[in-house]
Amino acid sequence: MEIIDSHCHIDVTDFDADRDVVLAECRAQGVSRIVVPGIVAAGWDKLLQVCRQYTGLYPALGLHPVLLVGHGANDLTRLEQRLASESDVIAVGEIGLDFYLAELDRQRQIALFEAQLAIANTANLPVILHVRKAHEQVIAILKQLRPTGGIVHAFNGSLEQAQQYIDLGFKLGFGGMMTYAHAIKLRKLAKQLPLAAIVLETDAPDMSGQPCRGQRNSPQYLPQYLTALAEIRAESAEHIAAVTTQNAMAVLAIK
């Protein structure tokens, strides 16, 4: 079985001490490809260097909404320039809206999000979305700007919102959170949604699942999340691995 982690920050300092070991373990377990989203312009150089150092890592570049205050005035221009010059970048992300954190200026978030969507459209790249407590606003913006699809990372909206994303050409990311028995709504979504709409992810080093609760999350734990999804859906892990991997590769145009 081969599976793809559609959202993992393997480039961050949390993995500096043992990145080689983690990635070797991933390969041994069938995690053959990892998508690595960017979060700040200052981190793009290292992200690209890490992705080029190891086989099977695919870079995305973006400006994360939660880190709003740290983004510079020229970062959008830098994003345009990098996308024009770095041919191996497969998506714009991690971008989006986070209305969960009250201290983040909503209008500045919206302006940043819309600007990055426009840049993605110019570059003809899909987008990787971070959305918390803002699904209706994000969907409205997507309907207006119409990017070429992408992934809604760590999806936690309603079934109706899921369908709207699907209609807009998006896949929905599921990971460690569905391994918790109390995540009733999320587990129900994972069961109800068409498998053709689902991709697997870890969001490592964050969002650890139940088996590694309180520890650093890692792409090597993706098979555990695959097993959880197979149990929730009462389908074989082999089938889910094949379909979710194809879903991620198709929506991100990974060869």
Image (spheres, helix red, strand yellow):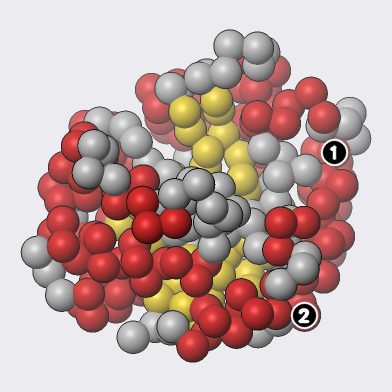
Which residue is tagged 2? 53
Q: Can residue 167 be seen in this view?
A: no
**Residue 108 picture location, percent across and down:** 70, 18
On screen, residue 55 above or below 171: below
Q: Is residue 160 visible?
A: yes
The total number of labels drawn is: 2
Q: Residue at x 54, y 53 (%)?
A: 215
Q: SS for tag 1?
A: helix
Q: Callout 2, which amino acid?
A: Gln
Q: Which residue is drawn at 23% across and 80% down?
A: 238
Residue found farthest to the front: 214
Splitting the image into 4 quarters, where does residue 102 fall?
Answer: top right
Splitting the image into 4 quarters, where does residue 164 fall?
Answer: top left
Q: Is residue 26 left or right of residue 223?
A: right
Q: Residue at x 29, y 78 (%)?
A: 242
Give the label on residue 203, or none.
Answer: none
Q: In this view, does 69 lie to the left or right of 28?
A: right
Q: In this view, does 154 lie to the left or right of 16?
A: left
Give the label on residue 75, or none.
Answer: 1
Q: Which residue is drawn at 61% across and 78% down?
A: 23
**Residue 73 picture location, percent across and down:** 89, 28
Name the front one of labels 1 and 2.
2
State which tag comes first along the sequence, 1 or 2: 2
**155 vs 91, nearest the viewer:** 155
Question: How many residues crowd mark 2 within 10 Å: few (<14), some (14–19), many (20+)?
Answer: few
On screen, residue 107 above or below 238: above
Q: Are marks 1 and 2 in contact (CB under 8 Å)?
A: no
**163 vs 67, nearest the viewer:** 67
Q: Callout 1, which amino acid?
A: Asp
On screen, residue 245 above or below 136: below
